[in-house]
Image: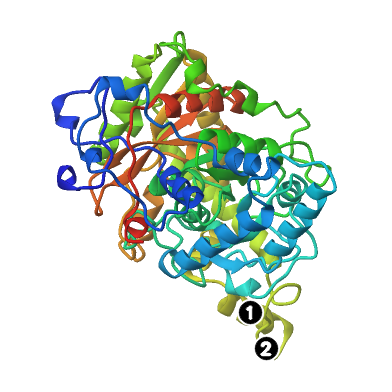
């Protein structure tokens, strides 16, 4: 039982939806423990035995809230407490130390220390310091990087080195970030566990026998394991939000068009979004502010100006006792019903109770067409994928297979280069677009998409934000669903509709479910109106900073 675990965080101080939910425990953003450890030089994560007992009400005022690791790093650099080289060396050491266990990186940068030295030189000369100066970050392997391989997790791009940076990557560099490597992913983003990578399977730092989620599982695991201070990912149907929930970190999927897709390897172009992972909502806000904005290279990127996201994220000491008074939250009814793990539902109910304790009103909001989103998504996504992946033919990118003629060379290159899940989705999409089936599948799916968009529009006129679980279960065992693709597809039920509607969504850790040595993280998904990231981040920050918690550490880190 979870209660017997000596290293855990227990929920305290807010109303409970019935005694049957009392076994669900709140956790904070676990990487805070790790980064605190890195700063003070300890060789082991220290977990107080008091963590297994309930905190008193008086201790809540003095508890440690999740901190911005990115701001701490930048401050230590600007004040001269540490150099960029020292910061980078610390993270690279931890990356290499933990990589054999977590396997979150496909490539580690050979230029990271060189870039850190150059940053130190500019600082010494009095040069301008960017908002991400000295911050070690990971980049998902489907975002092009000019100085590192970019394979999209696929053998068909093995060894491919782009001649340019993706716009989001270029903006990180211009903000002073140190890119430490490329993170593992499901091949071309097609998967929900990172088991679909052509190179290796990434493990969840909370329990190495479990998946980190996908397809951005490498980025989420790297942040959770402290291998980098933040990371970029991409989200086509939940590929940032589900790994964030599984790994106990903050994940942000921006509105469609908020961040340029230039340099992102296309899976489904009308659904793909570049987003980020962080140790706190503040970190996610800093990263979004750095990568968002118009781009002449992407016609789908919005020309809207980028707000100052961080200015509205107030310290917990500046909040009054009811900081959410007048804010309306709606729990999507269809996401907390049958088929959802009872611990997941309990964590979401208790998160709702905490929101109410802060002055917000919370009620259930029915979206009767919600279940139609999943089949519509898989028709649209696979159709677009069958078109987008036609470019990989062995001629322009990656290895080329032998063939007696051009068509056989194409076929052999694709047969050898693509994995089974990619082939499956190409076949599904090609079928949906074929003559005689277009109206029955693709056109119908587009009509369903319009219905989903209208449902969200109606719901967000009744409430300020919608909330839901991210997935029906916490992280599951490696290999548990690899031979049952339909079971894995169903895991996207709570996330794909947000992509169909083009809305922003934020995932914040809110509890623990039973499983593993010390529990498995559960994330709360917050969904807002299009281009409403500023309010979404503000409310998510208040929730995160006021959640009554004490700290825990993953099994992997606790053994060090």
The CA distance from mark 1 to mark 2 is 9 Å
Q: Is residue 473 visible?
A: no
Per the image, label 2 sits on a secondary structure element best described as loop
Name the residue located 42 percent from the left edge and 40 percent from the top edge.
29
Residue 360 drawn at (x, y percent) = 41, 13
Say left or right for 306 vs 337.
right
Disc 1 versus disc 2: nearer the observer: 1
The mark nearer the N terminus, 1 or 2, is: 2
Residue 40 drawn at (x, y percent) = 47, 49
Q: Which residue is mark 1?
A: 413
Residue 179 drawn at (x, y percent) = 66, 57
Name the residue located 64 percent from the left edge and 23 percent from the top edge.
311
Q: Which residue is most to the bottom?
A: 404
Say left or right for 382 vs 522.
right
- Label of residue 89 in the image: none
In which image quadrant can residue 9 be found?
A: top left
Residue 433 drawn at (x, y percent) = 59, 54
Visual colour scheme: rainbow
Identify the image quadrant of the C terminus: bottom left
In which image quadrant can residue 416 be found?
A: bottom right
**How many C-alpha atoms fall within 10 Å of the one at disc 1: few (<14), some, or many (≥20)?**
many
Q: 469 or 203: which is nearer to us?
A: 203
Placement of 296 over or under 537, stated as above or below: below
Q: Which residue is most to the top?
A: 326
Q: 52 or 371: which is nearer to us?
A: 52
Q: 231 or 122: which is nearer to us?
A: 122
- Whether residues under marks 1 and 2 lie with C-beta atoms below 8 angstroms apart, the answer is yes
Q: Which residue is mark 2?
A: 403
Per the image, label 1 sits on a secondary structure element best described as helix
């Amino acid at each position: 039982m979870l209660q017997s675990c000596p290293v855990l965080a227990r929920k305290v101080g807010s109303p409970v939806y019935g005694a049957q939910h009392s076994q669900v425990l709140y956790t904070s953003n676990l990487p805070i423990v790790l980064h605190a450890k890195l700063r003070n030089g300890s060789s082991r994560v220290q977990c107080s035995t008091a963590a297994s007992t309930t905190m008193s009400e008086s201790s809540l005022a003095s508890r440690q809230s999740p901190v911005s690791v990115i701001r701490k790093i930048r401050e230590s650099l600007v004040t001269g407490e540490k150099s960029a080289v020292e910061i980078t060396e610390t993270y690279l050491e931890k990356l290499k130390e933990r990589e054999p266990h977590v396997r979150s990186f496909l490539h580690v940068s050979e230029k990271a220390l060189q870039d850190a030295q150059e940053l130190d030189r500019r600082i010494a000369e009095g040069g301008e310091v960017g908002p991400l100066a000295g911050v070690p970050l990971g980049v998902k392997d489907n975002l092009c990087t000019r100085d590192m391989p970019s394979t999209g997790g696929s053998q068909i791009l093995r060894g491919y080195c782009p001649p340019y940076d993706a716009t989001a990557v270029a903006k990180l560099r211009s903000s002073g970030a140190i890119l430490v490597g490329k993170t593992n992913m499901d091949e071309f983003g097609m998967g929900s566990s990172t088991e679909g990578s052509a190179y290796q399977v990434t493990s969840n730092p909370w329990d190495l026998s479990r998946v980190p989620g996908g397809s951005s599982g490498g980025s989420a695991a790297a942040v959770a394991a402290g291998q980098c201070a933040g990371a970029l990912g991409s989200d086509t149907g939940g590929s940032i939000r589900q790994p964030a929930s599984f790994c106990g970190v903050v994940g942000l999927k921006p509105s469609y068009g908020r961040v340029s897709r230039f340099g992102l390897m296309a899976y489904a172009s009308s659904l793909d979004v570049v987003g980020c992972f962080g140790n706190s909502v503040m970190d996610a806000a800093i990263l979004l502010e750095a990568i968002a904005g118009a781009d002449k290279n992407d016609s789908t990127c919005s020309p809207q100006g980028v707000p100052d996201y961080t200015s509205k994220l107030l310290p917990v000491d500046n909040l009054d006792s009811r900081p959410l008074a007048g804010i309306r939250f709606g729990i999507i009814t269809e996401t907390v019903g049958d088929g959802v793990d009872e611990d997941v539902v309990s964590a979401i109910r208790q998160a709702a109770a905490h929101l109410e304790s802060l002055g917000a009103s919370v009620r259930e909001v029915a979206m009767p067409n919600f279940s139609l989103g999943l089949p519509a998504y898989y028709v649209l996504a696979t159709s677009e994928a069958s078109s987008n992946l036609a470019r990989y033919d062995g001629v322009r990118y990656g290895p080329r297979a032998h063939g007696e003629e051009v068509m056989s060379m194409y076929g052999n290159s694709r047969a050898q280069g693509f994995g089974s899940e990619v082939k499956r989705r190409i076949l599904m999409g090609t079928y949906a677009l074929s003559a005689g089936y277009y109206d029955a599948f693709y056109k119908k799916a587009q009509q369903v998409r319009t219905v989903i968009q209208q449902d969200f529009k109606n719901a967000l006129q009744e409430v300020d934000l919608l909330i839901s679980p991210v997935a029906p279960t916490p992280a599951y065992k490696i290999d548990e669903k690899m031979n049952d693709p339909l079971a894995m597809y169903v895991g996207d039920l709570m996330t794909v509709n947000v992509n169909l509607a083009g809305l922003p969504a934020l995932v914040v850790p809110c509890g623990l479910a039973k499983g593993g040595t010390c529990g498995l993280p559960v994330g709360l998904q917050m969904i807002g109106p299009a281009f409403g990231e500023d309010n979404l981040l503000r409310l998510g920050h208040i929730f995160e900073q006021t959640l009554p918690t004490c700290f825990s550490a993953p099994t992997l880190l606790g053994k060090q």
